[in-house]
Image (spheres, helix red, strand yellow):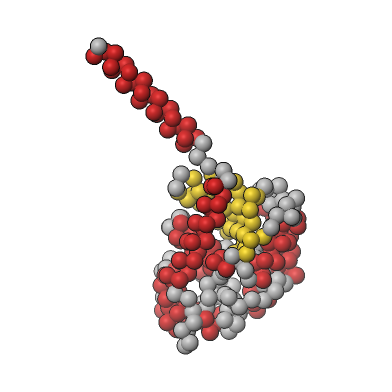
Amino acid sequence: MKYGKIVQWMVCCLVMHTGQLAVAADSPVVDVYLLRHGKTMFNTTSQVQGWSDTPLTAEGIKGAEEAGRGLAATHFIAVYSSDLGRARATARIVLAQGKQGMLPVQEDERFREWSYGSFEGRPDVEMWTPLFRQQGMIFDPQWGNWGAFTSKMSDRAIAQAIHDADPRGWAETYPQIESRLRAGMQDVVSKALATGGGKVLVVSHGGAILTILDLLVAGQAKGVDIPNSSITVLRYQKGQYHLLKAGDLGYLHSPF
């Protein structure tokens, strides 16, 4: 009798373990492709560009087209974009290069770039020089020492310093930036999980993408550069995010 109960217990455990493995194997996967918009006028003239907007340059359009060709064979179940014009334009160009040109672009203001308040449109050097100086560094307009700078100053500290320096107090605080980007990503992933998972394209901005990485895969992308038209891929599975690519331009040589 006692032996029979032991066997029965072992069988139950085996069934439960097998069931858990099956659930894990069937756990839906969501790959979020974070694409930075193509190069713009302000990117070219080194002016502060957050919520202010300038059009894609010829180089920016070319970059978006190249990204589109690199992603042409990637099947997306949904496409989202910041509601700023440079991101919308990039999303349309990318989709036109593939076979999903009719897939609707869902605009979401939560994926906007940081708001730099009254610094918007002013020379980059004017806003960034004091912050670099605080770290004993000289601001490089070509962003060659950005990695070294961010190794000394966190996203949170940078946002706070810009907010404090903004004479009108319009620049976003880090909690404001964090709140909208977290909520945006949560909605994107939740909707994808509800349909069984898949690949999702989100066209956003350099600063916003870096903050998303800082929030969701902290420490894994420290000092990473996010060039125009580059692709960053986050995988979500079983409640965890994993960084697959960051600031990647590999599609120029081999499509995804």
Q: Residue at 42% of width from left, 82% of height from top? A: 164
Closer to us: 113 or 6:
6
Marks counted in the figure total 0
Which quadrant does the N terminus fall into?
top left
Q: Residue at 50% of width from left, 48% of height from top? A: 236
- Would you place residue 27 above or below residue 192 in this image? above
Rendered location of residue 97, percent (x, y)? 75, 55
Left or right: where 204 falls relative to 69: left
Q: Residue at 36% of width from left, 23% of height from top? A: 12
- Would you place residue 232 above or below residue 90 in this image? above
Left or right: where 111 falls relative to 76: left
Closer to us: 85 or 120:
85
Rendered location of residue 50, percent (x, y)? 57, 75
Residue 132 seen by the camera: no
Left or right: where 179 falls relative to 199: left
Closer to us: 154 or 129:
154
The residue positioned farthest toward the bottom in the image shown: 167
Residue 76 seen by the camera: yes
Q: Residue at 52% of width from left, 52% of height from top? A: 190
Rendered location of residue 99, percent (x, y)? 75, 50
Rendered location of residue 154, percent (x, y)? 42, 68
Q: Quadrant of residue 88?
A: bottom right
Closer to us: 238 or 196:
196
Q: Quadrant of residue 225?
A: bottom right
